[in-house]
Amino acid sequence: MSEPEQIGGKLMSLERAVRTFVKRGDQVALGGFTISRNPMALVYEIARQSIGDLHLVAHSNGQALDVLVGAGCVRRIEIAYGGNGRFAPTCVRFRKAVERGAVVVEDYSNYQMALRFLAGALNVPFMPTKSGLHTDLVRLDGFSPELRRVAALPAKKLVVLPDPFDGEEGDVVLLPALKPDVALMHAQQVGDDGTVRIKGLTFADIEQAKAAKAVVVTCEQVVPAADLRRDPDQNALPPFLIDAVVPLPFAAHPTACHLFYDYDPQHLNEYRAAARDDGAYESWLREWVYSVADHDEYLAKVGDERLQRIKADPVRGYAVGLDRR
């Protein structure tokens, strides 16, 4: 049986998966968190295909967000946090784009974004919460009324109403559901039936996938579905939710993938240095994205020595002794 048949015809090349499921103007959900399990190979391919005018939505993201913004692929963002931890407490190209007005941003708390994806996953129009009351998150909008009309956005960022069941309990915040056109994520394993297994923290990936119209997954390994059935409580998503599977080792590099590899400090430091200067960043994009034909060429450029250096200890899940400076 061929591999495409094994995964119901969903096994695809990186180029085909992006070309099929990511379109100009789409609302795109980014999986992962800051410098952990970002869908980097997919992001690089989006930039290579020059897919623009994207509307990014994420719980908290870092490197993937910054590369897409820096490549000029993004018009709007809804997010709680965009940063690479100590490498960039606020992502460099993200910050520059906001300051220059190249992108518009509407911000929510981490919990609020998680609730918005949960609302989309449950197919309800909004989610109530007490979170954010009496803060600027409730008071200030990022998107103008004019933009909301032309961009098919919710009419309001959120709505604050008295508790309809007990007014003495005060107000509640109603958060609009998110239903992305496509969710991009990276997982450790996908079964040959399409079952997705994420090891370690799942962040908002599961809710994003359930809320999205399409889901594209890169993975470290395709494994027999029978192996995943031995402990089914460890599985994250069923096959019927997945639209494309792209097996690519190190597809989250330079971010980490628990149990497989750590984040790459050298790459992240080099990226930060380049991102601070417009000319240097254009050179970085040419070197690491536009002139790289595919993921294999990208890994060859990174080099086996560095990839071995960040390889994770199979028990601890991270690279022991890695110089993280």
Image (cartoon, grey):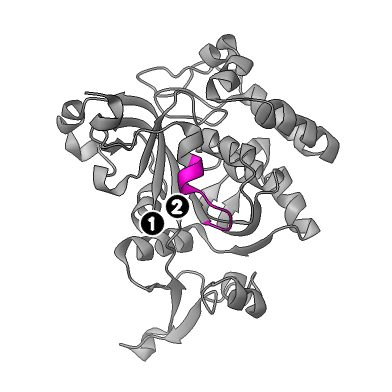
- In the image, what residue occupies the spot 51% across and 34% down? 15
Residue 318: give its label.
Answer: none
Which residue in the protein does label 1 denote? 213
Dots 2 and 1: beta carbons under 8 Å? yes
In the displayed structure, does residue 111 sit left or right of residue 87?
A: left
The correct choice, above or below, for 94 with respect to 13 in the image is below
Where disc 2 sits, the SS reads strand
Find the residue positioned furthest to the top: 305
Residue 291 as seen in the image, left or right of residue 132: right
Q: Which of 134 and 34 is in front in this view?
A: 34
Give the quadrant of the C terminus.
Answer: top right
Q: Where is residue 240 in the image (x, y as percent from the top left)?
A: 25, 47
Q: Earlier in the sequence, mark 2 or mark 1?
A: 2
Q: Where is residue 152 in the image (x, y as percent from the top left)?
A: 54, 72
Most foreground residue, 138 or 72? 72
Residue drawn 45% across the image and 72% down it: 175
For the magenta stretch, what is the residue range? 18-26
The residue pinned by badge 2 equals 182
Given residues 319 and 117, the one toward you in this image is: 117
Q: Helix, strand or loop at disc 1?
A: loop
As measured in the structure, the alpha-carbon distance from the residue carrying label 2 to the one carrying label 1 is 6 Å
Task: Give coordinates of residue 216: x percent, y percent.
Answer: 41, 43
